[in-house]
């Protein structure tokens, strides 16, 4: 398509779907955070160092792939949500273990 063409499917190279992407980030962060918290608290019930070790191994294992995919148009939103969910899950497990 040429830049001057009219129609419903005009090329918009600078448009970023912030609302759709933000929705994906929030949903993936919530789902990921709940998963990390549930798994981390179950492992911490066995032994706190086990929870730390498994979470560190998982994060280090996923990091190279996430780093390569960080600029892929759709996947970047999922990765941002997953990263936020992991951090929120870790914080929730830490607070749960310190308070409870």
Image (tube, helix red, strand yellow):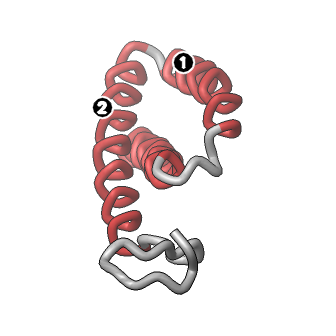
Residue 14 drawn above or below residue 80: below
Depth order, front residue of 74/35 = 74
Looking at the rendered structure, the secondary structure element under dot 2 is helix
Q: Nearer the viewer, residue 69 or 88?
A: 69
Which residue sits at x=30%, y=77%? Answer: 8
Task: Quarter of the image for the C terminus: give it.
Answer: top left
Q: Quadrant of residue 49?
A: top right
Total marks in image? 2
Q: Is disc 1 placed on a helix, strand or loop?
A: helix
Res 54 label: 1
| Image position, residue 96 (x, y; %) | 37, 44
Query: Is residue 73 shown to the viewer in this render?
Result: yes
Rate crowding at label 1 as few (under 14), some (14 to 19) or many (20 or more) other CA atoms within 10 Å.
some
At 36% from the left edge and 41% from the top edge, which residue is drawn? 32
List x then y, in percent, for residue 82: 46, 44
Distance between mark 1 and mark 2 Cα atoms: 13 Å
Which residue occupies the foreground of this view, 48 or 7? 7
Callout 2: few (<14), some (14-19), or many (20+) C-alpha neighbours within 10 Å? some
Say the numbered circle drawn on residue 85: none
Q: Position of residue 54 (x, y in %)?
A: 54, 18
The answer to whether marks 1 and 2 mark residues whose Cβ atoms lie closer than 8 Å is no
Tell me: residue 15, above or below residue 29: below
Residue 38 figure quarter: top left
Q: Residue at x 49, y 22 (%)?
A: 51
Residue 56: image location, x then y, percent: 62, 26
Query: Camera-side residue: 88 or 65?
Result: 65
Q: Is residue 1 above or below residue 47?
A: below
For residue 38, which numbered disc appears in the image?
A: 2
Answer left or right for 65 relative to 86. Answer: right
């Amino acid at each position: 398509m040429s830049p001057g063409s009219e129609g419903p499917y005009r090329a918009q190279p600078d448009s970023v779907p912030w609302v759709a992407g933000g929705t994906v980030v929030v949903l993936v962060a919530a789902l990921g955070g709940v998963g990390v918290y549930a798994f981390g608290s179950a492992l911490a019930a066995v032994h706190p160092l086990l929870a730390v070790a498994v979470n560190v191994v998982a994060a280090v294992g996923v990091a190279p792939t996430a780093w390569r995919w960080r600029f892929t148009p759709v996947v970047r939103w999922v990765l941002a949500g997953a990263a936020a969910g992991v951090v929120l899950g870790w914080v929730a497990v830490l607070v749960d273990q310190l308070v409870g």
